[in-house]
Amino acid sequence: MKVPCSNQTYGCNEFVGYQQKEKHESSCPHAPCYCPEDDCAFKAPACCLLDHFVTAHGWSPTNLGYNKPLKILLARDRRFTLLVGEDMSLFLLINTLTSIGSALAVVCVRPHESEPSYSCNISAAAHGVAGGKTDGRLVFQKDPHVSSSSLAGGVQMGNFFLLVPLEFAETSSGELTVHIRIDRVAP
């Protein structure tokens, strides 16, 4: 007996044997991903999230080249920065404010862990008093495996994050200068 995938609403046209339904759905590329914004119930396939983030929330996506460094000026109170990879993969740079600084993490927004895999380097340098130059202090984090999430349970920091001390923010604007590099990992 063949049954439709539960993700039919999101574009999956597969009919699978009843015994294989659970296995199929655990890797179905049409499974929904969720908007991380508070009080937003939007869910759709990952391919539809970019348009939602831009039109419903006014997010400005930043294009990201794999294996290339990217400099981002990050307002301390900005929770999410949307990064779009060369292959249209979506990444969120998550900024969680704490009493001692900003905890930064990266997540790939997709319904399941799948290929390709990614690794990530994030760094931030302290600003000096004059001219915005660094004063030599640096924090750095290498995540050997960027986690994937549909964001169904909300945004989770995960095991790897970078804690950037409060004093690293630029004094006049309060912005953090963050350098990020996401690499595709060969299977």
Image (tube, grey):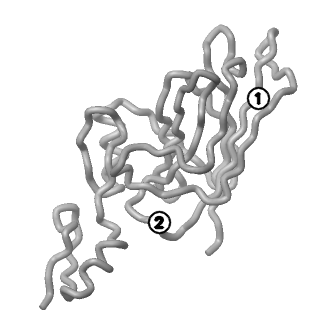
62 versus 125 height, above or below: below
Amino acid beneath label 1: Ala
Crowd around label 2: few <14 · some 14–19 · many ≥20 (10 Å): some
Task: Name the residue at 33% across, 54% down.
Answer: 33
Q: Earlier in the sequence, mark 2 or mark 1?
A: 2
Which residue is at the far bottom? Answer: 1
Would you identify the image quadrant in which residue 55 lies?
top left
Would you identify the image quadrant in which residue 4 lies?
bottom left
* Residue 114 x/y as whole percent: 48, 69
State if disc 1 and disc 2 touch (CB < 8 Å): no
Amino acid beneath label 2: Glu
Give whichever of 70, 2 is nearer the camera.
Answer: 2
Task: Tell me the element at label 1.
Answer: strand
Task: Name the residue at 50% across, 36% down.
Answer: 81
Q: Is residue 58 left or right of residue 10?
A: right
Quarter of the picture holding the C terminus: bottom right
Task: Name the residue at 85% across, 21% down.
Answer: 135
Q: How many marks?
A: 2
Residue position marked by numbered label 2 in the rendering: 113
As drawn, the label of residue 12 is none
Q: Is residue 80 left or right of residue 104?
A: left
Q: Is residue 76 left or right of residue 13?
A: right
As drawn, the label of residue 125 is 1
